[in-house]
Image (cartoon, rainbow, N blue to C red):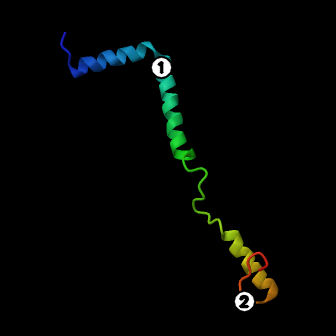
């Protein structure tokens, strides 16, 4: 018997066909890994939202309330 790439692939494929649960298990594991990498990798990062944006919004609100358009007040100071 000659060990060619086609024969190796054929033997490999036949061994996989004998155990279909292994194929399903590996497929599901790969799908979960790819999903984790795509969706959960940077879940805790700020991203496009600036964490100081509420501070600037409050300063703008206080400027509107007091009428002082020159001095921004942060936390009432």
The image quadrant where one finds the C terminus is bottom right
Cα distance, mark 1 to mark 2? 68 Å
Looking at the image, residue 53 sits to the left or right of residue 24; the answer is right
Q: Which of marks 2 and 1 precedes in the sequence?
A: 1
Q: Residue at x 54, y 40 (%)?
A: 36
Q: Residue at x 31, y 15 (%)?
A: 11
Which labelled disc corresponds to residue 55?
Answer: none
Quick one: 64 or 10, which is closer to the camera? 64
Within 10 Å of the Cα at label 2, are there few (<14), some (14-19), or many (20+) other Cα atoms?
few
Q: Is residue 28 above or below residue 52?
A: above
The image quadrant where one finds the N terminus is top left
Secondary structure under the numbered disc 2 in the rendered image: loop
Q: Quadrant of residue 12?
A: top left
Q: Quadrant of residue 58?
A: bottom right
Q: Quadrant of residue 45?
A: bottom right
- Report the residue that reaches farthest toward the right: 65
Looking at the image, residue 14 sits to the left or right of residue 43; the answer is left
Front label number (1 vs 2): 2
Q: Is residue 24 above or below residue 42?
A: above
Quick one: 17 or 49, which is closer to the camera? 49
Secondary structure under the numbered disc 1 in the rendered image: helix
Q: Is residue 66 above or below residue 12?
A: below
- Report the residue that reaches farthest toward the front: 77
Q: Report which residue position mark 2 lands on.
A: 69
Q: Residue at x 60, y 59 (%)?
A: 46
Q: Residue at x 48, y 19 (%)?
A: 22
Q: Percent position (x, y) of residue 65?
A: 81, 84
Label count reads 2
Q: Report which residue position mark 1 lands on.
A: 22
Q: Percent position (x, y) of residue 44?
A: 61, 51
């Amino acid at each position: 018997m000659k060990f060619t790439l086609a024969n190796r692939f054929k033997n490999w494929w036949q061994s996989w066909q004998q155990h279909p649960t292994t194929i399903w298990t590996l497929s599901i594991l790969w799908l979960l890994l790819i999903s984790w990498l795509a969706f959960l990798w940077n879940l805790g990062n700020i991203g496009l939202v600036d964490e100081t944006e509420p501070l600037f919004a409050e300063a703008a609100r206080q400027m509107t309330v007091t009428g002082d358009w020159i001095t921004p007040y942060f936390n009432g100071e």
